[in-house]
Image: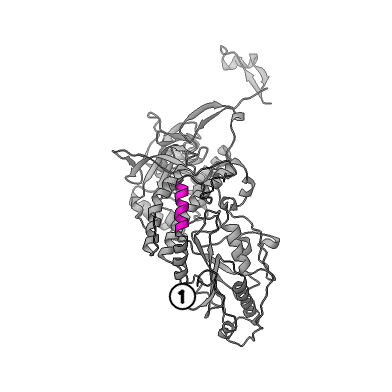
Amino acid sequence: MDSVKSCFPSEDRKSCSRYSQTYVVAKTKSTFDVLWQNGNISLGLEPHNLAPVSTPGDHDFWPGQFVLEKMAVEEAAEHQRIGIVRNVDALERTVNVKWIVPVDDDTVRYGSGPTEETVSAYELVEHPDFSFCTGEVVIRSALNINKSEADLTNGTMTVSRESLDTSFGFLSCIGNVVGYKDEGIEVQWASGVVSKAQHFEIIGLERLLDSSVESMNEVHISVDDDAEQDKIHRESTKNAPEEYAEDCSGSLRNAFIFSKTAFDFLTNAASSLFGAHGSTSSSSVTAYPQYQIVETAELHSSTEDFPEEKHIMELVTQIEKPRLSSGNDIKRFDVVVDCSDHHFVKEYGHENVKRGWLKKIQQEWAILQNDLPDDIHVRVYEERMDLLRACIVGAAGTPYHDNLFFFDIFFPPDYPHEPPSVHYHSGGLRLNPNLYESGKVCLSLLKTWAGTGNEVWNPEGSTVLQLLLSLQALVLNEKPYFNEAGYDKFVGKADGEKNSITYNENAFLLSCKSMMYILHKPPKHFDKFVKEHFACRAPQILEACDAYLGGDLVGHARDAMYVSDDGCKNCSTGFKIMLGKLLPKLVAAFSGAGIPCNQ
C-alpha cells in the first residue's frame, strides 16, 4: 500500500514536518458516473453493479454524438443531414436526433423549426470527423491555437502560438475527452483545466497519427492567412498518396499545422499522460474469420485428355451439353459467348497455358455441369476458359433469403497451384463482413484471409464448386455477424446475440437494396434468369416483408415459434421504420421489371 503523510491544518509548512505522521492506505473505493443511451445519468455507481459491453454494435449511438443521415447513392450528397443524438432506445433501435445545418467549416446553425425527430438507427452513421469517445486523447486544431490567446474568463481555454514555446502551452492543447456537454465536447486538458470544445476545434490524436505520420515526414508552418495555408497544404501533399491528399481537407487539414518538434512533443506527452495513444475508442478493426472448407466429391471427368496443341474451342465442343435446371428452362450450367462485362476481362495469360491447366479447367467444368445444386448457377465463356461467372441464391433462414449474389472468377495461368481470383458484384453495398463494397471477397480458401490445414486452397483437391459452396454456406449464413474475426467467442452471449440480430436486420435492408440494383442492372447472360427468379420469388419476398413489419425476426417470417438465442421474439421498431420506407421502392422495382405485385 502507498504511504501518506498528514499534518495539522494550523501548522505552517515548515513546522508540519515536526508533527507529520505516516499512514498506510488500507482501502480504496471507486465509483462510476454513467451516461446511459436513453439520456439518463447515474452518479456514483459501484463497479459490481455494472458489466462492461465488450463489443458495441455498429448501430449503437450515444447522447451528444454527431451523426450523418444515410443517403441513397443516387441522391445528392448536399442533402445529407447532420444531427446530434439526444437519446437512444437501444432495444427498439430508434434514435431521437436534433438536426443541425452546417454553415461553414467552423460553425453550425440550428434550425428555427422543429428539428428533433425519432429515426431508425439503421439510417444513421457516425460522423467521420466529429465523433469522439469518452477517454479519447485529443489535441487542438493548430488554427484554433493560432487565432486566440489564453482566456479563462468564459470557461474556455485557448492557447496562443507563442505559448507553445512552453511546456504549459503544450499541455493546454492536449487532453482527454470527459464527455458530451451542451452540444459540445467536454475535455480535461493536461494542464488540469476542464473546458468545452466544439467538434471542429479538436481532433483525435490516434486518428491524426494514423492519417499523417505515415504520409508526412514533416510539415512546417508560419502562416497569417488562408491563402498561405492552402499553399503550404498543397506543397505538403504534393508527393503524398492520392488518398492522403483527399483526406487533408477541412478540419482535419488544420490539425496538421504543427512543426515536427511540436508534434513529437504532443505524441510523447499523450503517451506518458494517457498511455499508448490514450484512446478508448469503441471502433473495431474489421477483420475476417477463418473458414472450414466444405468437402465435395473427388474430381471426376469422362472426357479424354486433350493435346496441348488443340485449340480451346475443340475442348469446349467435346464437353457434354449441360443439363437443364428442374422446373424451368434456365440452365444451371451453360457455355456462353461475350465476356465484355466480366470484372477480369483484361486479365491475360491463358493463351500459352500448359495442357495441365486445360485439363484442370475441363475437370472443373465437368464437376459444375454434373454437381451444381439448384440454387447455384454458373456461366463459362467459349472464348475465355479462364473466366467464369456464378450466381448464388440466398438461402432461407438467413437475412439474404431469395436474393441473388454474383461472383466473377478468374483462373490464373498457374491454376490450380494458386487459387482463383474472385470479385463480388456488390452494387456499392456492404451486407456481409466477408464481402467488401469494392468487390473483394475475404476467405481463407482464396488466400485473402489467414488459414491453415484444410482451411486453405489445396491444389490437389480444392475445386470451384467447393469455393461456391463455401460462399453459400459459410459466408451467406444465418448469423453473418459472427464471421468477424474473433467474434465467434461471443456466440451465445448477450452482447453477441444482440449485435447479431441488429446485423441481420441491417443486412436484410441492404439485401433489399441489392435486389433493386440487380433488377436495374443484371449481369450479362443472367438477364432472363434474374427476371424469372424475382418473378417467381417476389410474392415470398413481399410476404416476408409484411411478416417483418408485423414483428417477425429476420429470416424467420411466419415462424411464430422461433425465438433467438438471446430470447428475442420480435424485430425492432427501428428496423420496421426503415423497412416501411424501403418497401414501396422495392415494389416499384419489381413493377418496373414487369413483375406483377398484388401488395
Q: Which residue is mark 1?
A: 340
Measured along the vertical axis of the image, is residue 122 above or below residue 177? below
Q: Is residue 379 visible?
A: yes
How many numbered tags mark residues here? 1
User: Which contiguous range is marked in magenta?
Assistant: 539-549
Tell me the SS state at disc 1: loop
| Residue type, numbered disc 1 | Ser
Q: Nearer the viewer, residue 241 or 101?
A: 101
Q: Nearer the viewer, residue 209 or 504?
A: 504
Is residue 543 rendered magenta in the image? Answer: yes
Residue that protrudes farthest toward the top in the picture: 10
Where is residue 168? Give x, y as percent: 48, 35
Where is residue 523? Give x, y as percent: 46, 69
Measured along the vertical axis of the image, is residue 25 above or below residue 493? above
Secondary structure of the magenta portion, mostly?
helix
Where is residue 240? Give x, y as percent: 47, 59
Residue visible at 61% across and 15% down in the picture = 7
Q: Is residue 211 visible?
A: no
Q: Quadrant of residue 517?
A: bottom left
Circle 1 residues within 10 Å: few <14, some 14–19, many ≥20: few
Where is residue 559? Give x, y as percent: 54, 48
Q: Is residue 2 left or right of residue 184?
A: right
Q: Is residue 103 left or right of residue 128?
A: left
Q: Quadrant of residue 303?
A: bottom right
In the picture, the quarter occupied by the C terminus is bottom left
